[in-house]
Amino acid sequence: MDRLDNTIRPYAWGSTTAIPKLLGTEPTGEPQAEMWMGAHPGAPSRTGRGTLAEVVDADPERELGPAAVAKFGPHLPFLLKLLAAGAPLSLQVHPDLRQAMEGYEDEERRGVPLDAPHRNYKDANHKPELVCALTEFDGLCGFRNPADAAGLFDGLGVASLKPYVDLLHAHPEDAALREVLTAILTADPEEMSHTVTEAAAACVRLGGAYAPYADIAHHYPGDPGVLAAMLLNHVRLQPGEAMFLGAGIPHAYLSGLGVEIMANSDNVLRCGLTPKHVDVPELLRIVRFEAGDPRVLRPEASPDGEEVYETPIDEFRLSRYVLPEGGATHDLTLLTPQILLCTAGAVRAGDHELTPGRSVFVPAGEKAEVSGTGTIFRATVRL
């Protein structure tokens, strides 16, 4: 079992206080957006045996187990994070596995450099995600009913939004959503900036259901993503609740601290709320124009105390154990690789004392007993 020393990424949207508060450290004054736990080449966790990427590369079958290597290849297929949003992240969508493979091969064939700002596919993998709230956590997830979106636009009283309102009342609903998103993202930039400015002022004035969009517009003035965001469901997770973000689902995180887990990939297609490249044609090919209420996940408890967040993919499986006052002991030994992350209290994992924000890597088949009082998240794979 290896104690992990993890990198904190200072992205501009990060909270300056949330991760330091969890870790019990002094804020630096700089944003601390994500703490990465895993073997991702961008910032692999460090162990006493080298980086976790080096440890896995040296003996994949011992570290990951033969079954995981046979199914996912000789690498850890997930990345676990602490994510602290102090400002809205970009509005984005991820491809499915087939789309990622085709897009990556196409850009490789055309010689688009991996670090080119207009490159869409950094790798040939998909990027499903799950985020579990540690504090109240706000986000956007999937399209709201077009009629509800029309009502939201109409309520702003902005004349230039009237064509979008009319389109959203058209049928079929998937075509209406596609037409409106396309119109927003391809509009004349100067005219769109004026419309967004008017809409933002109305959001500030009206408050209530419009308040999240007023905050988004404050961070991204004039950005067409402000209107695109209003097409999506606003979700507020309470601590312990989660949401799963599958392929083609437009989403954005707005604020809060959470545990996030994802398949190892950097493939992101952006819809707005960003100065980065937006490839509208490719985005429209990937987005699933399906309206519906976002599903808030709550953990399903098993008799042994494990609480599982069920998702439809195999590259990761996230669960938690809440060890009560007075202490409890659980045997977490598995034939798959694990990362254990403490988020509350004090938990002993093998020979390691874990306090909030501390984590360990457990090789496949290695004895993994935890005890103490607190909360520990377990990240592994599904075979």
Image (spheres, grey):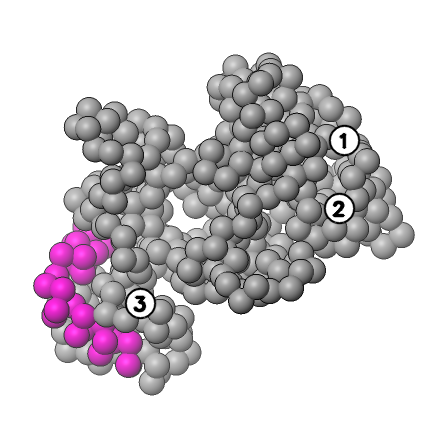
User: Secondary structure of the magenta portion, mostly?
Assistant: helix
Left or right for 135, reference 194: right
- Regarding mark 2 in the picture, which secondary structure is present there? strand
Q: Is residue 2 magenta?
A: no
* Circle 3/circle 1 CB separation < 8 Å: no
Between disc 2 and disc 1, the foreground one is: 2
What percent of the width, then of the height, locates residue 336?
63, 24
- State which quarter of the image contains the N terminus: top right
What percent of the width, then of the height, locates residue 96?
34, 34
Q: Nearer the viewer, residue 238 or 273?
A: 273
What percent of the width, then of the height, locates residue 53?
54, 28
Give the residue drawn at x 32%, y 71%.
Answer: 217
Q: Earlier in the sequence, mark 3 or mark 1?
A: 3
Magenta residues, start to end: 175-202
Left or right for 161, reference 363: left
Q: Amino acid at mark 3?
A: Tyr
Q: Amino acid at mark 2?
A: Leu
Res 260 seen here = yes
State the separation of the CA atoms marked 2 and 1.
Answer: 13 Å
